[in-house]
Amino acid sequence: MRLAVTLLIASSIWAGFLGCGPAPPKMQLDAEDQFLLAKKKYDEHKYLDAQTEFQKLIWNFPGSDYVDEAQFYLAECFFYQEDFPSAIHEYQRLLNNYSQSPFVDIAQYKVGLSYYKQSLPAQLDQDFTHKAIRELETFLEEYPNSEQVPEAQNLLFASRTKLAHKEYLSGRLYYKMGEYASALIYFEEILETYPDTKWADDAQFAIGECYRRQKKWTQALKSYQQLLEMSSSESLVRRTKNRIDEVEKKLEESQKSPG
């Protein structure tokens, strides 16, 4: 009886030791399973968790067939968390380290898009807009057959339109200050660099206004007439015709004046 009790106590103590011991080590996933786990988190929009799992794959399986795709989705995780500087860094790592990856074209596009997402309103600094334009132009030059080309073209046009708006606001500021020569520099820059944007018509009208304010009737008339040839805006055309009538009268009066 005592022996049975002793054995029972000993078994209980041994079981207690086993229960308190360390858990057996977890088996490391192979590259494919690690990618599938990370992608599952990504598809569930659990971007922070997915970010961790993609990073594990990149660290643990640098020579894997999945590593370039993991690098791309790691960048995507940052993008969808709106951490655009980190996203740009990770897209660039893909472009630099895995140049043969099928994801390089969209990565290049996403670099431009990430800069565009950080672009400030037209009245503020446009450094990010300039960077977006540079990256989007690189994308269009290097990947002309990519599916992202139409989207990149739209973003490029939107970026250029914002820069044109910036130029127009600067010109208007000088115009309001009566610095017409300085204002003309900005308005003419729009016509030269951004003639396809909606600000070109406004710039052309503003050029006429600058000349009119300086009583340079011949230059003003020419500017207004050029606007009639290029604008399809009914309201702007109507204003321009009124200005032409006014300037033609002034021009006629100046020609009749002695001296």
Image (cartoon, helix red, strand yellow):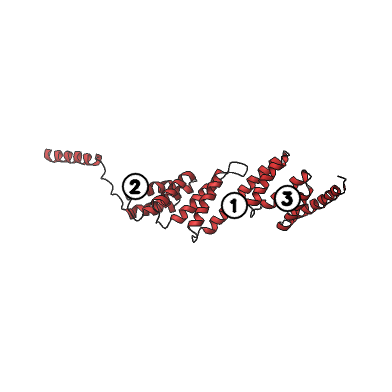
The Cα atoms of the two marked residues, 3 and 1, are separated by 22 Å
In the picture, the disc for residue 59 is 2
The Cα atoms of the two marked residues, 2 and 3, are separated by 59 Å
Q: Residue furthest bottom?
A: 145
Residue that numbered label 1 is attached to: 158
**Dot 3 amino acid type:** Phe
Q: Is residue 183 left or right of residue 28?
A: right
Number of numbered markers:
3
* Label whose residue precedes the other's in the sequence (2 or 1): 2
- Report the front residue among 57 and 37: 57
Q: Are marks 2 and 1 in contact (CB under 8 Å)?
A: no
The residue sitting at 59% across, 53% down in the picture is: 157
Residue that numbered label 3 is attached to: 205
- From the top left corner, tell me how far across and down residue 154 is, in percent: 57, 55
Density class for disc 3 (Cα within 10 Å; few <14, some 14-19, many ≥20) is many
- From the top left corner, tell me how far across and down residue 186 is, in percent: 66, 45
The residue sitting at 59% across, 52% down in the picture is: 158
**Dot 1 amino acid type:** Ala
Badge 1 element = helix
Asked whether residue 114 appears in the rendered view, the answer is yes
